[in-house]
Image (tube, rainbow, N blue to C red):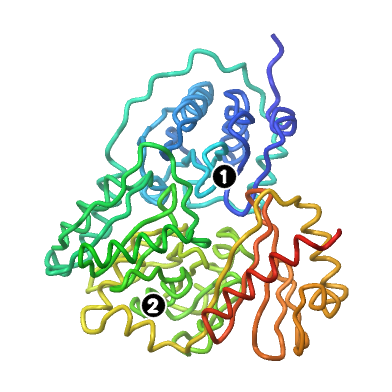
Amino acid sequence: MMPFKSNEVIKSSGIKFGTSGARGLVEQFSSNVCAAFTHAFITSIQPQFTFKQVAIAIDNRPSSPAMAQACAKAIEQLELEVIYYGVVPTPALAYVSMQDNIPCIMVTGSHIPFDRNGLKFYRPDGEISKADEQAILNATAEFEAITNLPVLTVSDKAAIQYSERYTSLFDSQMLRGKRIGIYEHSSAGRDLYAPMFEALGAEVIALERSDEFVPIDTEAVSDADKQKAKNWSRDYKLDFIFSTDGDGDRPLVADENGEWLRGDILGLLCADAMNIEALAVPVSCNTTIESCELFNHVTRTKIGSPYVIAEFDTLCENYVSVAGFEANGGFLLGSDVFINNKTIKALPTRDAVLPALMLLAAAKEKTIIELVKALPQRFTHSDRIQNFDTNKSIKIINDGIINPTKLLANLGIANVRVVSVDETDGLRMMLSNDDIIHLRPSGNAPELRCYAECYNDSNAIKLVEKTLMKIQQIRA
């Protein structure tokens, strides 16, 4: 039988890279497709790095174990050793692999529905770049058909080292007297979080573990999850609620009243608590980041962790402490930082635990509610239209870039004008009343996202709802 070529298999699969990893329908990720991505990834980085092992981990999706086995088989074909960490958060896999100076592959679809899945790739020095993605797609690695999937034995090393990364930073009684609820659902890190918070003195209440995969989107929290948090906070007298998306790299935290914090506000508070000097954040993040005047420098990027990470090298040339975060809450540490006279190593990939713990550390003297209220009050909201044709999204946005005034009229927004337009990623319109509307096609699924920023929370919600309703009426 003729060997397969990785670029041909990948192209015929229809799978593409989004803002974070390769994403597609489960049926598209056949064993041979998983192998094609694995061969392409490994062979594309072998000229730059020397390694004999490759690590793999997965989320709790039903399709993830078989995909991991196919990737492992491909690694064996390359005569490399597979280290399998089972179900752990993406940042746990990335962290231990970086310490061991080996590449790794995370099988996860993050927050997207369970009928989809994906692969995230990490070089020995961290998350792959957009250039690396193109190298993977263009690679012509040859491999034999995947048969006889291997049995994988789980190592607990990643789970242990990831937990110790954070518990070692703080006093064992830092959270004494705190009642913390953990919304476990199907998060990849759900078995790690309770012991981690308990090791710091907290009383932990486990909430709503699910045997079925739950696609939690930390940027578009459902009304049901908003109400759940309020109920849990009241019923269990909680000081804090912690959760994540499916692969544990995006946090979802609630204050003393059970109100979920926006991810960029959480990131801002975390960066402040860590005395970060320079930030890289996506263009969709709240403008409070600049107006609070807590940081020496803020760079705005396209949406997606590769773009945030790409700015770190430049920032590190001029600043000692560098970090980034996204509107989804994922926090990226771009440099080593001293916390409590201890060094926490850089981890340039999204992480959910660090911002949660730093917020709790900052809330020892003030409540979380008080910390948020002390910031300049700008409110953001986002939502999406699912199953919305990407080509239609792109046409609406391109037409809006050419004539933003006409788009504003089509959205039914009167008595204001477009002051400026930002095309960094999609179309972000700054209006004369200081409201902001930002439209962007999702990089992971056929969805159109809308972000809004206003001086009033309810106005931001209404602006998103009205915009998305009107968008669906536009003929494009």
* Picture disc at residue 24: none
State the separation of the CA atoms marked 2 and 1.
37 Å
Q: Residues within 10 Å of mark 1 (few under 14, many from 20)?
A: few
- Residue at the location (82% across, 78% down)? 409
Q: Amino acid at mark 2?
A: Leu
- Mark earlier in primary sequence (2, 1): 1
* Element marked by disc 1: loop
Horizontally, residue 310 falls left or right of residue 212, namely: right
Q: Give the camera-side residue of 83 and 233.
A: 233
Residue 209 appears at what percent x and percent y? 31, 45
- Residue at the location (30% across, 51% down)? 162
Which residue position holds label 1? 48
Q: Quadrant of the N terminus?
A: top right
Horizontally, residue 362 falls left or right of residue 348, namely: left
Q: Residues within 10 Å of mark 2 (few under 14, many from 20)?
A: many
Q: Amino acid at mark 1?
A: Gln
